[in-house]
Amino acid sequence: MTRSADDPFVSAVKPLVDAMGAEMLPADQAGPDDVVLSWEGVDVVAVRLPQLADSLDHILAALERKRGKPLAELDRKAKQEVVRILEARGAFSVRHGVETVAGALGVSRFTVYNYLNREKDA
């Protein structure tokens, strides 16, 4: 049994799926790497998780939306806060994560490393 997008369960999990940058698809179309969500013994929807690099881009875009302007336009203190948030979310474990973040913030890789080290020293 496949449920529609207006199903209460699907509606309830959609904000989480969107926040992760994932994609929902019918449960019967799930691939081997997809996560099938079940409710009361019925497979309701499959969630296709994004690749890690895509997740970082999604997180950066969400931070920009939340702040209402490009991250490169933030002041130094706000950029440091963004780096703290990204570190907590594992952004720097992604290949080229520092470079990607530096580009989004409009700073050098060296500056991002300084922000990270400043947090460790605090």
Image (cartoon, rainbow, N blue to C red):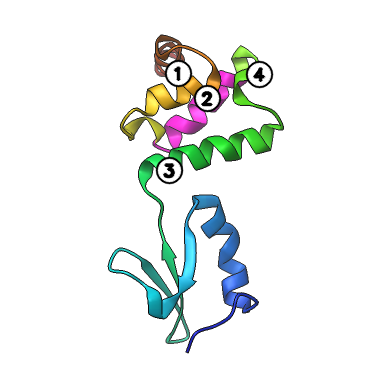
Give yes or no for residue 93 being in the magenta stretch: no
Q: Earlier in the sequence, mark 3 or mark 4?
A: 3
Residue at the spot x=52%, y=24% of the render?
104
CB atoms of marks 4 and 1 within 8 Å: no
Classify mark 3: helix, strand or loop: helix
Judge depth for marks 4 and 1 and give the one in front: 4
Between 83 and 49, the one nearer to me in the picture: 49
Mark 1 highlights which residue?
A: 119
Q: Which residue is mark 2?
A: 104
For the residue marked with disc 3, what is the amino acid? Asp
Q: Which residue lies at the image location 60% right of the left edge and 13% below the top edge?
A: 76
Residue 87 point in image, percent of width and height = 43, 30
Q: CA distance from mark 3 to mark 4?
A: 22 Å
Query: What is the three-letter code of the residue carrying label 1?
Result: Glu
The boundaries of the magenta stretch are 78-90
Residue 119 vs 8, above or below: the answer is: above
| Element class at badge 1 | helix
Label whose residue precedes the other's in the sequence (3 or 1): 3
Q: Are marks 3 and 1 in contact (CB under 8 Å)?
A: no
Q: Position of residue 121 (x, y in %)?
A: 41, 13
Whether the residues at callouts 3 and 2 have beta carbons within 8 Å, the answer is no
Report the amino acid beneath label 2.
Ala
Q: Which mark is residue 73?
A: 4
Judged from this view, the residue extending furthest toward the front is 29
Helix, strand or loop status at disc 4: helix
Q: Which residue corresponds to the image point at 59% horizontal and 40% vertical from the top-left?
A: 62
> 10 Å neighbourhood of mark 4: few (<14), some, or many (≥20)?
few
From mark 2 to mark 4, how far is it between C-alphas?
10 Å
Q: Nearer the viewer, mark 1 or mark 2?
A: 2
